[in-house]
Image: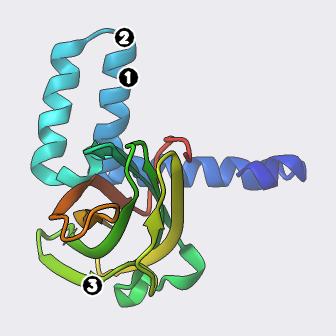
Amino acid sequence: MEVAAKDEDYEEAARLRDSLKLFEEEEPVLQLRRLMKEAVAEERFEDAAKYRNELKDIAPHSLLRCSSDATTSGVRVQVKSVYIENRSQPTKGQYFFAYRIRITNNSDRPVQLLRRHWIITDANGRTENVWGTGVIGEQPVILPRTGFEYSSACPLTTPSGRMEGEFEMKHVDRVKAPTFNVAIAPFSLSTLGDDSDAF
């Protein structure tokens, strides 16, 4: 729509606007999200709560943001997901999402990431557990006050879903230190995206 407006093709821009509006009216998740946003802006909080509850019933993932942020034992994990349209084939039920993770060690001790555990849930409620050694083929050691970033991806058969999980880590400044789990807070995988900022 913006491209059409910039090219001064106002007829095309209007057509796109109308088709988006029609799509929103026919798509209950979009409609409820819009109604909830309007109700909050107008301080009609009872209505906003009603729309939120309806959304929870029909599309629980739509209330999650496409980013999350959690700190466990001084280790902060920030995630941001994005829909990759050019690698997806919606007509074949293939939706491809990428996510970027930043791990920051705000503790006073060096830590090593040993293993990962993901819980991936699609829009139909089907859940898959994925375990693996390290991340992207590495078991990084993260020194105090430093960080580690990586990107990965997740295919889904539905246009939305959610991911959450944990990293198993250990302190490497002590022999036979016990391992501990660092939470990866839930975040949405959504073709609609959201307005959350990248970290």
Way the structure is coloured = rainbow
Q: Is residue 141 above or below residue 53?
A: below
Image x and y of residue 19, in percent:
54, 55
Q: Nearer the viewer, residue 186 or 44?
A: 186
Image x and y of residue 23, in percent:
43, 55
Q: Is residue 184 above or below residue 14?
A: below
The quarter in which the C terminus is drawn is top right
Q: Are marks 1 and 2 in contact (CB under 8 Å)?
A: yes
In the picture as drawn, the residue positioned furthest to the bottom comes out as 92
Decide which of tag 1 and tag 3 comes sooner along the chain. 1
Quick check: can you spot residue 159? no
Image x and y of residue 108, in percent:
39, 43
Q: Amino acid at mark 1?
A: Glu
Q: Residue at x 35, y 79 (%)?
A: 134
Per the model, the C-alpha gap separating discs 1 and 3 is: 43 Å
Q: Is residue 25 left or right of residue 140?
A: left
Q: Is residue 179 above or below residue 127?
A: above
Task: Name the residue tied to disc 1.
Answer: 38
Task: Name the residue tied to disc 2.
Answer: 42
Task: Name the residue tied to disc 3.
Answer: 132
Indicate the secondary structure of the residue bearing disc 2. loop
Q: Residue at x 38, y 22 (%)?
A: 38
Decide which of tag 3 and tag 2 comes sooner along the chain. 2
Residue 188: quarter of image = bottom left
Q: Nearer the viewer, residue 82 or 109?
A: 109
Per the model, the C-alpha gap separating discs 1 and 2 is: 6 Å
Q: Amino acid at mark 3?
A: Gly
Per the model, the C-alpha gap separating discs 3 and 2 is: 47 Å
